[in-house]
Amino acid sequence: MHAEWTKLRTTRGPAWLLAATVAAVVAVGAASVASVDVSQCPAPTECHEDTTRLSLLGARLGQATVVVLAVLAITNEHATGMIRTTLAAVPRRHRVLWAKAVVVTVAVLAAGVLGVLGALATGRAVLPGNGFTAANGYPPPSLTDGPTLRAAVGTVLYLVLVALLALGVGTVVRDTAGAVTTTLGLLYVVPLLVELVADPQWHDRLERLAPMTAGLSVQATRDLDRLPIGPWAGLGVLAAYSATALLLGAVLLETRDP
Amino acid sequence: MEATIEVRDLRKRYGATLAVDGLSFVVPPGRVTGFVGPNGSGKSTTMRALLGLDVPDSGSALIGGRPYRSLRHPLNHVGALLDAAAVHPARTARDHLLWLTHSHGLPRRRVDEVIELVGLPSAARRPAGGFSLGMRQRLGIAAALLGDPPVVVFDEPVNGLDPEGIRWIRGFLRSLAAEGRAVLVSSHLMSELEDTADHLLVIGRGRLLADIGVRELLDTASGGWITVRTSRRTEAMTLLAGEGARVAAVDRDTLTVAGLPAERVAATLAAHDVPVRELAAHRASLEEAYMELTRKSTEFTSLTGREA
């Protein structure tokens, strides 16, 4: 574990990717909250805008750098041949994967907390100026508000679970480009394909099963009854994906010759 | 822990290629054992199996009586240099050694000790990606020695070293063996091992061709001959041919003798009072002895045009 932490710390890539994640979450959040104004709505009180969710929209972009970071944690070792040094040093190979999972979790957790706090602070600063005031029924996003707290914590966990999914896929695929494409495809492309499904019942079913749409339902703070899946249940779907990918990765890491 | 390597009936197939075919040998402590064979003869595969990287199809490879993957802190049992390129190019040599140290709970000072030992202090804080092959070899050797292991395994450590580096590693390998460690070092060139190894394992197409001391190998080689200078050349030739030697005249007073040890040549000539002005034995080089051993296997390889 200490060894994996040293590995992460001693190259510059991971730190840049974590900084980029924070920046993406905050910047996209800022752009989103700046682009809405109650004047665009029929009435200031009828915008039906989920201001918390809007502030946290940046997670959709931030997850991409998280995926790259987590995939590289394992595929970089295959690309440089270092995996042989690693597995010779730690012949109980599953321990390598668990150590990487813990280190990646801690790193993404830290970046996620910074990003989410930054995005909510930006939302609080910008939204009232655009008419999203408490008087109009839009109290500024606050962590003392139950649903907002759940959305904030959920978004951090969402990023961590995406990282673990990417680490699992990276362990299975072993190739950086292949693993990043597979994971991002699973996250971004599946929801696009779901939109093409005309049948409403199947559409909903698939939205419940797609890792990104299901997982991000944790960000919703209004109109929960209109979500295809409940906030925590949705995060659970993503967690199931991550667990499956990690377990498959662990089995293959133990049995394949590096 | 006993400082030995035991390989028993090891077999490993990659697709259609049988890389290692029933290999058995023991590497005892206290001497340098050379592992020689042409490229693709199965040396690296054997070493990878020894380090638990490749799972053999059958047979076993044990370090001190235990399979590598059952070792909790393997660097304390066996140090290995398999692939000098197996480092992250952006990480410094020092940090590379540092994470290895952390994986084994070894004290931090070991990093500086092994860096000193292999002569890398000036480069320790530079990214390993900018290292020459020779420097990477030194880094790999430093990593192998972190846990002060009783067994060391080096795959082609001489590759990429400059003459000074080659001299260094020869002395270094010998000193490791002198400290009582089991040292297994591979090479595809016998000449690289000539002054280093005490014992040789010769491998060809995944099979063991010889498990023999360096001296015995030289003695069994058929390539040796003796030059004799004498004023009574014709008489000497007749006498030695009578003893079963193959003789040939070189010039008026010089002949070469093959197939008879130098002592017998000298004794025969002395017994008949043939004056000898010079008697010089030319031993077959280790390279020649090795070529003779491997010829069969390489011939077969080139016939089928297949790299094992």
Image (cartoon, rainbow, N blue to C red):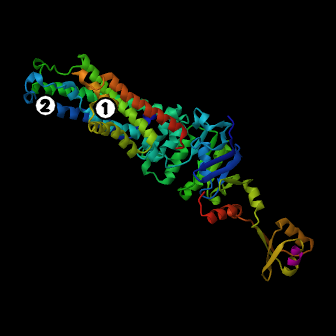
Q: Which mark identifies residue A30?
A: none
Looking at the picture, which amino acid does disc 2 mark? Val
Q: Which residue is mark 1?
A: A202
Over which residues does the magenta segment extend? B237-241
Position of residue A194 in the picture relative to residue B192 (left or right): left
For mark 1, give the secondary structure.
helix
> Is residue B240 covered in magenta?
yes
- Label 2: few (<14), some (14–19) or many (≥20) C-alpha neighbours in 10 Å: some
Residue A65 percent coordinates (x, y): 32, 38
The residue type indicated by label 1 comes to Trp
Is residue A12 visible in the rendered structure shown here? Answer: no
User: Considering the numbered disc 2 on the image, is that residue within a helix, a strand or a loop?
Assistant: loop
- Quarter of the figure with residue B6: top right
Q: Is the N terminus of chain B in the top left, top right, bottom left or bottom right quadrant?
A: top right
Q: Which residue lies most toward the front here?
A: A199
> In the shown orientation, is residue B184 left or right of residue A72?
right
Q: Which mark is residue A36?
A: 2
